[in-house]
Image: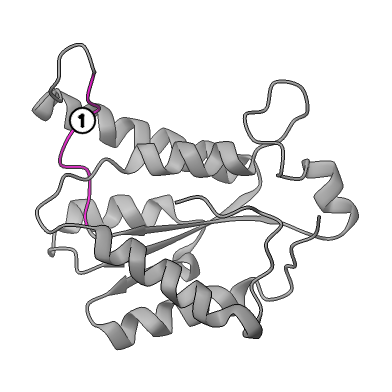
Amino acid sequence: MIVPLTEIWTEQNRNRLKSVLAGTLNAATEGSASYIPAGLIWAWHVLHNDGAGSIFTQGRTQAELESVKGKKVIVLFTDGWNNTGPTFPTAGTSLLLSGIDNANTTQNTLCTNIKNAKIELFVVSFLTVSNPTEEQRLRSCASSTRHFFKVQTADQLITAFRNVAVSFRPVRLTD
């Protein structure tokens, strides 16, 4: 789900934010496939605005942000890791095993490039099965150890999102 960048989340419309988040979480189905690069690509495109040719134009350019001491932030929220590759419409199926390797490589590259683009990257891993390799991949995706949250309960999830919000509290959205 994409929320316009100029919408300001305030205490007055807090219930709307809760509703948006609850609806998004309820739409997720257990046992569904995860392909993290798709979410990262969309988030990066939404925030990227270099003028001509940008897909989304709501995002500020880096120069505009620096002039107001702003920053770009992505919060990757996942309940898993890549367990499928990209699906190609002509084939109708994913590439499964070779696709998973491709997904992991693509994810690693995207995380690096997003951070190199001066975008702060938070990762919230919720209810993921304990797999040290995949957990490390998600940890490495985050901008730093402070930007990674592994949560198993609703209370931990609330705490994680509160910590994320506190981390970029000085940020404000402008139009």
Q: Quadrant of residue 70?
A: bottom right
Quadrant where the C terminus sits is: bottom right
Q: How is the image coloured?
A: one colour
The residue shown at (62%, 49%) is 119
Describe the element under mark 1 as helix, strand or loop.
Answer: loop
- Dominant secondary structure, magenta: loop
Who is closer to the viewer here, 39 or 107?
39
Whether residue 98 is situated above or below residue 148 in the rendered picture = above
Q: Residue at x 59, y 41 (%)?
A: 46
Q: Residue furthest bottom?
A: 155
Along the line of sight, the residue nearer the viewer: 144 or 97: 97
Q: Is 43 situated above or below 11?
A: above
Residue 39 horizontal/vertical position (percent): 40, 43
Taking the spot 56% from the left edge, 81% from the top edge, the residue there is 14
Left/right of residue 115 with respect to residue 157 in the rendered view: right
Residue 119 is left or right of residue 58, and the answer is left
Query: Based on the displayed image, in which of its 4 quarters is residue 84 positioned?
Result: top left
Image position, residue 31 (x, y; %): 9, 53
- On the rendered structure, is 18 left or right of 84? right
Bounds of the magenta segment: 80-88
Q: Amino acid at mark 1?
A: Gly
Q: Which residue is mark 1?
A: 85
Residue 174 picture quarter = bottom right
Q: Is residue 160 magenta?
A: no
